[in-house]
Image (cartoon, rainbow, N blue to C red):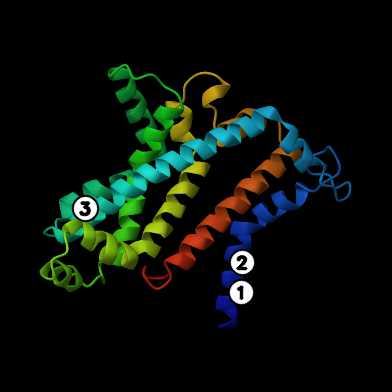
Amino acid sequence: MRALDAWLAAVYGFLYLPIAVLMVLSFNKSGMPTAWGGFSLEWYGALAANAKITGAAWNSIIVAVWSTAISTVIGTLLALGVERARPSAPRDALLFAPMIIPDIVLAIALLSFFTLIKFTLGLHSIVIAHVVFNIAFVTAVVRARLRSYDWSLNEASRDLGASAFTTFRRITLPLIGPSVAAAALLAFTLSIDEFIIAYFTAGAGQASTTLPMQIYAMIRFGVTPEINAMASVVMVVSFVMIFTAQRLNRGRIPGA
């Protein structure tokens, strides 16, 4: 067991030590990205005062909120429909394909489609692109809960005279609500962090630049403590969202 614990610690160290170093250097007073010069919150202040960064962050929030809302509604309804239908391996493969298709392939496909239909690119095109891959994740999380759902409750509700909508609102939704919330948080996190698809489907100019795109534009000129601070904020937000989603869905997804 000691050898296994040591191996586990080594793996976690390999995964998270670089992130820990980045977060520590975000408090570095020195202007050098790696040479420690003392503790300071200077770079977080500079981050908040940078109009390009705050604008890009606001764009990311807009995209994440809209894509999460749309994909959560569609994904939940899709999960309900698929779970009640006859099992089909090809259908499931098509449903979850966006989860395993490389981002670069999906990005090129979406850009080609938008160009083909002469669709103007901007924040709205990024929202649509994020909805495409978020639907699969939402559906997977909600379906995991529906696997143990007692459908006889719906039948009893309908037998007592409730409409399909009332049954969904009063019976189904409250029971699967934690999973829907977890799926929404996961979709929001994925949308906030996503870069490749946003880069390909964004319009020209700062008006459609998301936070990961802004980070990429800044890092091309070198890593600075300001970039470390921005990356730390994104990492903390992502961890909080994923942890919250896991807590909401604990016991409903195998391994959670």
Residue at mark 1: 6
SS of the residue under disc 1:
helix
Note whether 153 is above or below 199 in the view shown: below
Residue at the front extreme, as displayed = 161
Q: Residues within 10 Å of mark 3 (few under 14, many from 20)?
A: few
Q: Earlier in the sequence, mark 3 or mark 1?
A: 1
Q: Residues within 10 Å of mark 1 (few under 14, many from 20)?
A: few
Residue at mark 3: 92
Kindly identify the amino acid type of the residue bearing the numbered disc 2. Ala
Q: Quadrant of the C terminus?
A: bottom left
**Residue at image x 33%, y 46%?**
135
- The answer to whether the residues at label 2 and label 1 have Cβ atoms under 8 Å apart is yes
**Residue at image x 62%, y 58%?**
16
Q: Earlier in the sequence, mark 3 or mark 2?
A: 2
Residue at the right extreme, as displayed = 37
Q: Is residue 234 left or right of residue 181?
A: right
Residue at mark 2: 10
Q: Toward the viewer: 31 or 64?
A: 64
Mark carried by residue 235:
none
Q: Is residue 76 left or right of residue 85?
A: right
Q: Quadrant of residue 225?
A: top right
Rounded to the nearest angstrom, the CA distance separating label 3 from label 2 is: 36 Å
